Amino acid sequence: MKGHNLLVRLVIPILALVLGGTLVFAILDLAAAPVDLRGMVAARMAVSGVTHPVTAVLLNFRGYDTLLEVAVLLLALLGILAVLRPVATTPVSRPGLPVLETLAGMAVPLMVLVAGYLLWAGAHRPGGAFQAGAVLAAAGVLLHLAGRLPAWVSPPMFLRLGLGFGFLVFLTVAALLLAEGALLRYPPAHAGVLILLIESGLTLSLGLILAGLYLVLAPPPRREDGGGEESGAP
Amino acid sequence: MSGAFDILLALALLWSAWRTLTTQDLGRAVVMFIVFGLLMTLAWARLDAPDIALAEAAIGAGLTGALLLDALGHLGRKGGRRRP
């Protein structure tokens, strides 16, 4: 047993070192990119509908990747909802600490404002749907911690619709554009409006999804372990 | 001046990553992870990548940190066991 442990302790670091060395060598040996991506993006900025190159790449030139990324996030939350056993007791959020409640009351409106700004700013400077959605989600988590927002034991229909809304808007735009010719190739005249539409939907849904990762897992406080859980929801 | 700052930042990143992985106390590990995320935000900002810096601050440090703290609360309720 001792010898086995020693072997493991010797072999694993050596393998890790070999792997690390190979990776460093591979990076140093990497050939220069055969295409000038930066130049290509800069050359096509005029037809992208936005003026910030990162947003242009995420929502226009590589919109398909972003579409799938949102689908993955949605699937992650659906997985949690599917695995989670519903709890019989209705969740009552605990009364928050007075300081936390006051802080939440002051911070949450500002956070919603910041999320709106980040969404709007995404067109011409750093910002965008993912960051705005994360700020919205953080506002939701803060409200939950302050005792103003109960955990989601089984999300009602409008909440489920909200979770999928951004993805559905994105998918609808993609499907309509597919009828025009190619997937997610926006007509330059309407690119800006379409991107803003998609990003607004995504901000709402990403905020709900990211907050859901926290709120769905958060159990109702003072839950009876054992007996209450077995009876379950119908 | 900025060179010294970058070197300090890189050292602090390595240090916080090492502390996150090796500390025995789970609560301290989570706090060090959040510290790592905030330092990483600074690093992205220094690399002129404000988009990634924003995402890192909001998702990497903020939301993941909150989730980890929440998970820690669950673990604590079940008996307060620490990593051996």
Image (cartoon, coloured by chain):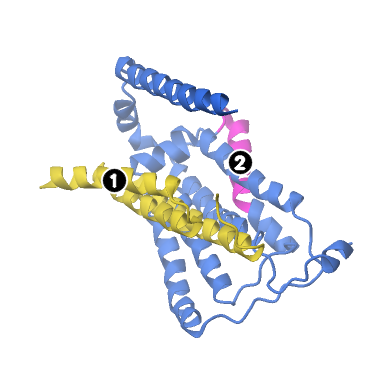
Chain colours: A blue, B yellow
Is label 1 in contact with label 2 (beta carbons under 8 Å)? no
Q: Which residue is mark 1?
A: B43
Q: Position of residue B54 (x, y in %)?
A: 37, 52
- Secondary element under disc 2, as helix, strand or loop, is helix
Q: Quadrant of residue A90?
A: bottom right
Q: Amino acid at mark 1?
A: Ala
Cα distance between the residues tagged 1 and 2: 27 Å
On residue B30, the disc is: none
Q: Residue at x 56, y 59 (%)?
A: B72
Q: Is residue A200 magenta?
A: no
Q: Amino acid at mark 2?
A: Val
For the point 57% across and 28% down, the residue is A181
Q: Residue tagged by mark 2?
A: A72
Residue A152 position by quadrant: bottom right
Q: Provide the residue span drawn in magenta.
A: A165-183
Vertical comparison of B4 with A223: above or below: above
Callout 2: few (<14), some (14-19), or many (20+) C-alpha neighbours within 10 Å? Answer: few
Query: Where residue A169 sits in the image (x, y, percent)?
Result: 61, 48
